Image: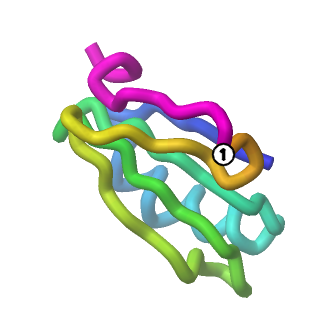
Amino acid sequence: MLLIEVSDSTLAYDRQIKRPLYAKSGIPEYWLVNLIDNTIEVHRQPEGGNYQERFVADRQQKISAVAFSDVTFQVAGLIR
């Protein structure tokens, strides 16, 4: 339903190699916690080897997973 990955030194690898593999595997939603930029990259709607929906949430924003829409997270609370 949701895969969350925390990344700093492997950020390029996670974006270029892992993200397409997750999309090909049909993982519906993938959050990449980017410790370099203090953001969460949200990827949804996998199709082939790519996600059709993508947005970046910064520390001031709140996000929720599609599968758990009643649960909201403050990004600042997930990134310290």
Q: At x 41% / y 37%, what residue is drawn?
A: 33
Image x and y of residue 56, in percent: 31, 56
How far across and down, in percent of the image, does residue 63 sit?
45, 43
Picture quadrant of residue 2: top right
Rendered view: 19 above or below 11: below
Label 1 neighbour load within 10 Å: few <14, some 14-19, many 20+: few
Q: Is residue 31 above or below residue 17?
A: above
Rendered location of residue 28, percent (x, y): 74, 62
10 or 3: nearer the eye? Answer: 3
Start and end of the magenta stretch? 70-80
Whether residue 27 sits left or right of residue 73 in the image: it is right
Label 1: element kind: loop
- Magenta stretch: includes residue 69: no
Residue at left offset 69%, top offset 69%: 23
Q: Position of residue 47 (x, y in %)?
A: 71, 84
Residue 74 shown in magenta: yes
Q: Residue at x 37, y 28 (%)?
A: 74
Placement of 2 over or under 19, stated as above or below: above
Q: Name the image quarter holding residue 22.
A: bottom right
12 is higher (above) or lower (below) than 53:
above
According to the picture, the residue beneath numbered tag 1 turns out to be 69
Return the residue nearer the eye: 24 or 1.
Answer: 1
Pick the quarter of the image with the C terminus: top left
Is 34 or 73 nearer to us in this picture?
73
